[in-house]
Structure formats: C-alpha cells, structure tokens
C-alpha cells in the first residue's frame, strides 16, 4: 500500500494565481525528490455542513476557497525521507508572512493506504 499526505488550506480567491504558482513549484520539487504523485484541487462543490465540513475545518471566509491536496509516496519511510529533503529545498522556501494563504488554518495528516483501486501495481506493504 502507498502512503499519502493530505491537507486542506483556505486560499483567498484573489491569491489563487500566486497559490497555483507556489503549488506548481512545490509539486515539481516533491516529485523530483521521489514522491509518486502530487495533486492540488480547488473546491468546486464544497458545501458548509451543519456539524463538520471542509469550510468549517479551515474557518473559510466568504472571499476564500478550500484547496484539497495530497501527495502519494511508496511508503511512510519514503515519505519521511522525501519530506526531509523538500523542507531543506530553497526553491520552495517561503516565510510564513509571504504565503498566499493563512497557514494557521491549514490542516494536514499522513495516511497509510487501506484500499487502493485503479492504481495499477501497489508496492508491497
């Protein structure tokens, strides 16, 4: 099974172009260091829930959109190795005050694969 990092981040609509540029560069860096896949998706059908939802989780404001993203790795070991390299890569270094989103409202986590369909051959667990 693969290992996946997932995250959701609120991005001001006015900053989507800047965010896209940062995400494109970040994706290239992750893939160069060994990630298998990199996805960033802008919310299109993301209703506010009554108890939980993406908008509630990031305290989405009226002028923002939720971005849902994930990075696929061969294993947790590979993820840890790759992320250590990415965090040291100057190409995506950005002081928090210069980010095109509010990092304090971002949430993320790492996940071990449970069911994988349509991927082709998965690495051995």
Image: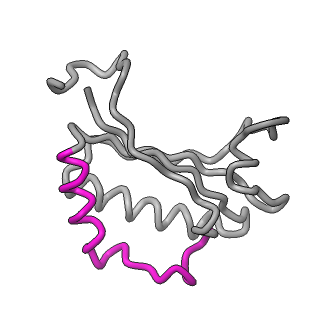
Image quadrant of residue 32? bottom left
Per the image, is 70 magenta?
A: no
Q: Identify the colour scheme used.
A: one colour
Image quadrant of residue 118? top left
For the point 26% across and 47% down, the residue is 35
For the point 71% across and 54% down, the residue is 65
Q: In this view, which residue lies farthest toward the left?
A: 124
Measuring from the top left, give residue 44's x and y in whole percent. 71, 40
Principal SS element in the magenta part?
helix
Measured along the vertical axis of the image, is residue 55 above or below residue 2?
below
* Nearer to the camera, 110 or 63: 110
* Nearer to the camera, 92 or 58: 58
For the point 25% across and 19% down, the residue is 120
Per the image, is 79 magenta?
A: yes
- Left or right? Give the position of 62 relative to 85: right
* Nearer to the camera, 27 or 56: 56
Q: Report the magenta residues as a range.
A: 77-101
């Amino acid at each position: 099974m693969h290992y996946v990092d997932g995250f959701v981040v609120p991005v001001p609509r006015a900053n989507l172009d800047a965010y896209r540029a940062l995400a494109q560069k970040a994706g290239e860096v992750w893939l160069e260091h060994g990630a298998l896949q990199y996805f960033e998706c802008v919310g299109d059908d993301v209703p506010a829930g009554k108890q939980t939802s993406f908008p509630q989780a990031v305290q989405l404001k009226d002028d923002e959109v939720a971005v849902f993203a994930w990075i696929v790795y061969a294993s947790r070991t590979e993820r840890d190795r790759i992320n250590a390299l990415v965090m040291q890569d100057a190409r995506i270094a950005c002081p928090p005050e210069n980010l095109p989103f509010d990092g304090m409202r971002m949430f993320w986590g790492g996940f071990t694969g449970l069911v994988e369909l349509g991927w082709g051959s998965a690495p051995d667990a």
